[in-house]
Image: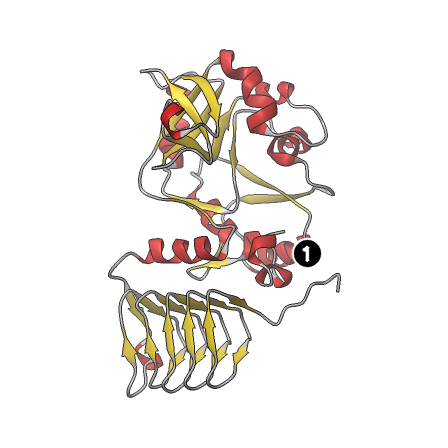
Amino acid sequence: MGTRLRPLTYRIPKPLVPVMGKPLMMHVIDSIPKEVDEVIIPVSYKKQAMEEYLAKNPPKRTVTLIDEPEPLGTGGAVKNVEKHIDGPFLVINGDSLSSLDLAKFIAFHRNKKAFATISLWPVEDPTPYGVVDLSEDCRIRHFQEKPKREEAFSNLINAGVYALEREVLAYMGKGFVSMERDVFPKILDRGMYGMRFDGYWIDCGRREDLLRAYWTLMGEQLQRIDKTSVHEGADIRAPVVLESDSVVAGASVGPYAYISTRAVVGLRSRVERSIVLENARIGTRCRIVDSIIDAGVTVPDGTHVESRIISTAKDPKG
């Protein structure tokens, strides 16, 4: 439901939240290697919106949406689609972006003859997370939940991508099941492995993290500009993206700004470290900082927006 991204997620479900012009779930789907023959997405909130998107933008692989009437946890969601799984399978969190090479991840799982393999991400401070203890051959020996810094036996945390043998399903009950708390401890002695990767890993559940996903994918130098978008007097500072049919009229945009298609930034306004989605209009003399302006929003002249999500979408429950 993306509660921490509201009011943006009153309009669209979190899997459809755009990052660099493409929904979160499509970043995930497009990263999956061809040997994966079907993508199964358990969904409840705004399922129709996801069906409509997939109908208009069909992926180059089979995608099946499965009803999940109530939250089941990661393990419960997997158990709920058991009849669709006929062999080894991946479980991927749909609201994070990472540089994990899934083809290498699958090969690692097979080479280790693992029962289960977990993606691992190094962090500076492991205290808010569950960490793992690896042997020299990358087998997981222990899990440690939210350790004190001085007691942590590693800085490697669960990055939310798993390769699992089908037999793992036997360790999952029906109803709400946590993979981390209810399943992994039961299968530890069956052969669990962890593969560390570097690059980036971003959970996109909050405004500041969603912004960070944009800036990470843009890099420090990217400057992708539709030349017809820039009008006289505009000050454009990389990294920045101005999509087609956007208009920057004598405004300052960047560094770190994404202006979507048909969005307008008015005279003497400034947009920095912010995203302006399609058909939004920023008036004159506005300042937009560390914020997300949702599709179709009009920001009145002289408005200062900082560290916010601005949307006209309303809570459907009133």
Q: Quadrant of residue 183?
A: top right
- Image coloring type: secondary structure
Q: Depth check: give the residue in front, 38 or 69.
A: 69
Image coordinates of residue 312 in percent, x first then y, are 61, 72
Most distant residue in the left direction: 221
Q: Nearer the viewer, residue 270 or 116?
A: 270
Q: Position of residue 27 (x, y in %)?
A: 45, 50
Q: How many numbered dots are placed on residues in this image?
A: 1
Q: Amino acid at mark 1?
A: Gln
Q: In this image, 247 relative to 223: left or right?
A: right
Q: Is residue 313 left or right of residue 175?
A: left
Residue under label 1, please give it: 48
Between residue 79 and residue 235, name the one nearer to us: 235
The picture places residue 288, in percent across and down from the top left corner, at 42, 73
Q: Write the residue at 46% across / 36% down.
A: 128
Q: Secondary structure at mark 1?
A: helix
Up-down relation of residue 248 to residue 141 (above or below): below
Q: Residue 75: which quarter of the image? A: top right
Q: In the rendered image of this protein, does residue 227 appear above or below residue 239?
A: below
Residue at left offset 51%, top offset 15%:
188
Residue 219 placed where, x, y %? Answer: 29, 56
Q: Tell me if 162 is positioned left or right of 226 in this view.
A: right
Q: Mark 1 Cα within 10 Å, few/some/many (few <14, many 20+)?
A: few
Viewer-side residue, 30 vs 122: 122
Q: Residue furthest top?
A: 189
- The quadrant in which the C terminus is found is bottom right
